[in-house]
């Protein structure tokens, strides 16, 4: 028999509880199922990146042709390159 999960007043209280508790005492993981959360956005972090002005101008030009913000296009390019490097075909 698993322990009963407490009722939490705040998310911070729940976060603290689960950071210290052994979840296997509360949840029977043998009955768990894999779930794909396709609409979950990954956490992001703001960074400062210095690029040559010409590179930014050219990136903006390419982004304008695709009708997307240049920061989004830069993320696409980075993601493609990371995928190529980590998972070469």
Image (cartoon, helix red, strand yellow):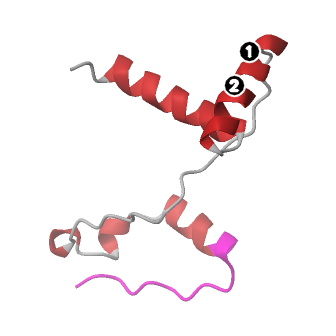
**Whether residue 23 is situated above or below residue 87 in the rendered picture:** below
Q: Position of residue 11 (x, y in %)?
A: 65, 75
Q: What residue would you read off at disc 1? A: 55
Q: Position of residue 35 (x, y in %)?
A: 29, 67
Are there few (<14), some (14-19), or many (20+) residues within 10 Å of tag 1? few
What residue range appears in magenta?
A: 1-13
Q: Residue at x 44, y 84 (%)?
A: 5
Q: Nearer the viewer, residue 53 or 75?
A: 53
Residue 1 placement: quadrant: bottom left
Q: Does residue 17 belong to the magenta stretch?
A: no
Q: Which mark is residue 45?
A: none
Q: Residue at x 39, y 65 (%)?
A: 37
Q: Nearer the viewer, residue 27 or 89?
A: 89
Residue 68 in the figure: left or right of residue 57:
left
Q: Is residue 52 visible?
A: no
Residue 84 placement: quadrant: top left
Mark 2, secondary structure of its residue: helix
Name, please, the residue furthest toward the front: 65
**Whether residue 65 is situated above or below residue 17 in the rendered picture:** above
Q: Which mark is residue 59?
A: 2
Q: Is residue 87 visible?
A: yes
Q: Residue at x 74, y 30 (%)?
A: 60
Q: Position of residue 24 (x, y in %)?
A: 30, 67
Mark 1, secondary structure of its residue: helix
């Amino acid at each position: 028999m698993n322990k009963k999960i407490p009722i939490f007043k705040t998310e911070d209280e729940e976060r603290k509880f689960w950071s210290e508790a052994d979840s296997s005492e509360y949840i029977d993981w043998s009955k768990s199922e894999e779930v794909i959360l396709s609409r979950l956005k990954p956490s992001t972090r703001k960074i400062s990146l210095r690029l040559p002005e010409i590179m930014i101008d050219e990136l903006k030009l390419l982004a304008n042709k695709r009708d997307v913000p240049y920061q989004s296009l830069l993320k696409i390019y980075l993601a493609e390159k990371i995928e190529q490097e980590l998972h070469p075909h």
